[in-house]
Image (cartoon, rainbow, N blue to C red):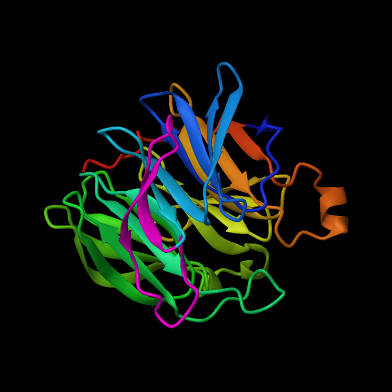
Amino acid sequence: MTVEVAIPTVNNILGEGPHWDDQEQKLLFVDILANKVYKWDPVTNKLDSITLEDTIGAVVPCKKGGYLVGLGRTVAHLDWSSQKVTKLQEIPLNGTKNRFNDAKCDPVGRFWTGSMGHQISQNPNVFEPEKGELYCYDTDGTLHKRVEKVGISNGLVWTQDNRTMYYIDTVPAQVYGFDYDVHNGTITNRRVVIDYENYDDADSMGHPDGMTSDVDGNLWIANWGFGKIICFDPNSGKKLRTVQIPAMRTTSCCFGGKNLDELYVTCAKQGATDEELAAYPMTGSIFRVTGLGTKGLPANVYEG
């Protein structure tokens, strides 16, 4: 196994939302607090970016062209060539300065995106409690709230049989499983499948953030605070392996590359001390892990 810096020229404040575009063979990701969307070609090493008017929680390609982005509190369409932004739906304030965070598309192309409350302390890890929600932006353009009273809405994954959706709330440090109805995009039977408090080394695991899955159905979770990607079996909750990243504030990960066997990892500089930056000088970069002996599946795109 090898861990390396894939894009040393990136210095993200809050890098997030990596998505491997299987069609273009490029890596998409965002810097939430810099309001930037990035597109990187690993063959040419060309890095393009667009700066928008608000925070950007995630970016996902649309089958009909362009991209969906979680722009502030809106679901919006971005045309890359013209940089035109069309706002499609907006979520209520919910009594807070909430914003969209992580997002992914389900197996039939619905855009699932969650929100989080406003930072209420100088500590970048403290936010208004239970102000987040999880929404489904359907392929017909309608927006539906599916979960409420969320701490920090984060990673999303669906099983290959389309019957289960996994979802992370970072604040209680839990991964939930839901029965998934792929026909109408509804979720039922919420249960906790991974609870960080149940592990003997919980104090050194960090906070679960974004995640992806491999061909065997295992969950690969990025953990804020300890620079770790931890692979779990969601059926047993067993930790299968840990990948140490040389940056403490890892935020998310996705499988990419032509064989989908390279794990790309985003991280952040937000809140890092001078001592931390000296110890981990590549903090804010995009990392790539190879030689894991597994691979991912093509990422879903928006079908609306």
Image quarter of the C terminus:
top left
Query: Is any part of residue 288 visible from this angle?
Result: yes
Q: Nearer the viewer, residue 70 or 228?
A: 70
- Residue at image position (55%, 74%) is 118
Q: Is residue 304 left or right of residue 73?
A: left
Q: Nearer the viewer, residue 56 or 274?
A: 56
Q: Furthest-top residue in view? A: 44
The quadrant holding residue 83 is top left
Query: In x, y percent, where is residue 221?
Result: 51, 53
Query: In x, y percent, where is residue 186?
Result: 19, 63
Where 12 sits versus 102, above or below? Answer: above
75 within the magenta span: yes
Q: Tag count in the figure?
A: 0
Q: Nearer the viewer, residue 193 or 23?
A: 23
172 within the magenta span: no
Query: In x, y percent, where is residue 256?
Result: 47, 31
Where 20 sits versus 13, above or below? Answer: above
**What are the residue bounds of the magenta stretch?**
73-100
Where 118 sits versus 180, above or below? Answer: below
Image quarter of the N terminus:
top right
- Residue at image position (56%, 35%) is 49
Where 37 sits versus 268, above or below? Answer: above
Q: Is residue 191 left or right of residue 247?
A: left
Query: In x, y percent, where is residue 100?
Result: 44, 62
Q: Is residue 184 left or right of residue 127?
A: left
- Residue at image position (34%, 76%) is 148
The quadrant holding residue 179 is bottom left
Q: Is residue 136 left or right of residue 195?
A: left
Query: Is any part of residue 293 visible from this angle?
Result: no
